[in-house]
Image: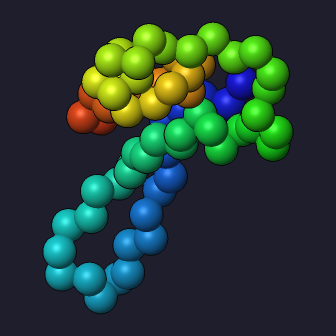
Amino acid sequence: MVPRWQTYSAYKSPNDPCPVLETRRFIIPVNQFFTVQPRRLKQFAYREALRHGVLWPDLYSPYTGGTDS
């Protein structure tokens, strides 16, 4: 599986007066790698699904504020 966190280097213009973040990071949601929903995926209980915001534990991806690698 592809790592959830990806990085890229931003373009820095020679005329840009502001400093640039050299490397930027972003997260790719797990559901982007499914072309078809697999059968019999394990499901959260009703209340857990509401708390996590997703029905399937395999698609749950907690946001850690960019500290996760």
| Image label count | 0
Residue 39: where, in percent of width, then height?
81, 21
Residue 5 appears in the picture as rendered = yes
Residue with the most extreme bottom position = 15
Does residue 15 lie above or below 7 as drawn? below
| Quarter occupied by residue 35 | top right
Residue 37: where, in percent of width, then height?
76, 34
Does residue 36 lie above or below 14 as drawn? above
Does residue 50 lie above or below 34 as drawn? above
Residue 26 shown left or right of residue 39 in the figure: left
Residue 43: where, in percent of width, then height?
56, 15
Residue 68 appears in the picture as rendered = no
Q: Residue at x 68, y 30 (%)?
A: 2
**What quarter of the picture does the C terminus occupy?**
top left
In the rendered view, how is the structure colored?
Answer: rainbow
Q: Residue at x 37, y 33 (%)?
A: 53
Does residue 40 lie above or below 10 as drawn? above
Q: Residue at x 35, y 16 (%)?
A: 48
**Residue 69 or 1: which is nearer the viewer?**
1
Residue 23 shown left or right of residue 28 in the figure: left
**What quarter of the picture does the N terminus occupy?**
top right
Residue 18 shown left or right of residue 45 in the figure: left
Residue with the most extreme left position = 18
Residue 51: where, in percent of width, then height?
29, 24
Residue 30 shown left or right of residue 46 in the figure: right
**Residue 12 or 30: which is nearer the viewer?**
30
| Quarter occupied by residue 38 | top right
